[in-house]
Amino acid sequence: MISVAIINQKGGVGKTTSAVNLGAGLSLLKKKILLIDLDPQAHLTYSTGIKAHELSRTLYHVFRGDASVSETIIPRPIEVNLPFLKNGKKSNTFFVLPASLDLSGADLEFGGIAGREFLLKESLSQINDFDYVFIDCPPSLGLLTLNALTTADEVYIPLQTEFLALQGISKLLETIEIVRKRLNRNIKITGIIGTRFDGRKRLNREVVEKIRDYFGKQFFNTLIRENISLAEAPSFGKTIYEYKPDSYGSEDYFKLSVEIFERDKTKNNTA
Ligand SMILES: Nc1ncnc2c1ncn2[C@@H]1O[C@H](COP(=O)(O)OP(=O)(O)OP(=O)(O)O)[C@@H](O)[C@H]1O
Ligand SMILES: [Mg+2]
């Protein structure tokens, strides 16, 4: 089981879009996937078509000890036909651990208790039968994100290939470094995702070069292009593969899923 925290304290850079569509993409590649919504805004939950306000149990109840992870996880079937593949008909079921607005009080409610950084890690010790767990973090470096960092083996950082893409990154890297020293010495950054790329814009191309200079091999080869369908899909509760299988967004996120799949195949040999 590889657990990945998808983090950037900057808002709107593509964390949730990446969590949903990489999770779904790897699921279509036959991996068993759990998506964890760690954001009180519950965007990931809604984006996968789950109505958070109708749920009686969410991650919040798990943190309180009122529900187990296995009874809170929701199965989400997916069936698609991807036109850019020879055998594009694919299906599977991925799983979602939903969030709700209750989580917004987490800092206050759990901030004073011993072991507050390990709430998520402890909850997940109940499960071990997933290939990947993707944790969608809120846009802050508060207690919830800290919980993701103590739990995760790996960190993916989405960066919008725009002006100021790297602003705030040193603070984020510093936080990860502190977590590595004190709370989780296994954690490493394994994927920088360039999002909302527009190759026609010189600035975008320059920013990509800057990111590549800064991160080198950690920067994924596949770039996610700017694509309106990616912005529309969440309001239908659909992944990009279901909403617009022939879009750039669908092609790019599937390609990145394959890149991750191929890279991680050899992980045990190179680690
Ligand atoms: N490649 C893309 N092309 C066009 N729109 C995109 C793309 N990626 C994401 N978006 C849109 O940009 C907005 C922000 O994306 P997303 O919600 O994934 O970011 P986030 O980092 O999770 O934000 P937050 O910090 O608020 O949780 C959303 O409306 C999303 O649909
Ligand atoms: Mg988000």
Image (spheres, helix red, strand yellow):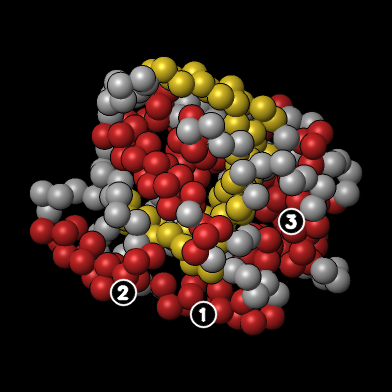
Identity, as a three-letter code, of the amino acid under mark 2: Tyr
**Within 8 Å of ligand 2, the CB of disc 3?**
no
Mark 1 vs 2, N-terminal side: 1
- Verify CB contact (< 8 Å) between mark 1 and mark 2: no
Of badges 1 and 2, the one in the foreground is: 2
Of badges 3 and 2, the one in the foreground is: 2
Give the left or right position of residue 180, taking residue 246 as reference: right
Q: Is residue 193 above or below residue 235?
A: below
Label 2 Cα neighbours within 10 Å, binned few <14 / some 14-19 / many ≥20: few
Q: Is residue 205 above or below residue 167?
A: above
Answer whether residue 12 is visible to the viewer in this image: no
Identity, as a three-letter code, of the amino acid under mark 3: Leu
Q: Nearer the viewer, residue 264 or 220?
A: 264
Mark 1 vs 3, N-terminal side: 3
Label 1 Cα neighbours within 10 Å, binned few <14 / some 14-19 / many ≥20: few
Q: Position of residue 81 (x, y in %)?
A: 38, 18
- Farthest residue, direction front: 269
Q: What residue is pinned by disc 3?
A: 120
Figure quadrant of residue 231:
top left
At horizontal 86% and vertical 41% (from top left) the residue drawn is 67
Q: What residue is pinned by disc 1?
A: 174
Tell me, for residue 75, which label it has, or none: none
Give the left or right position of residue 156, taking residue 198 as reference: right
Tell me, for residue 214, which label it has, or none: 2
At horizontal 27% and vertical 26% (from top left) the residue drawn is 84
Figure quadrant of residue 251:
top left
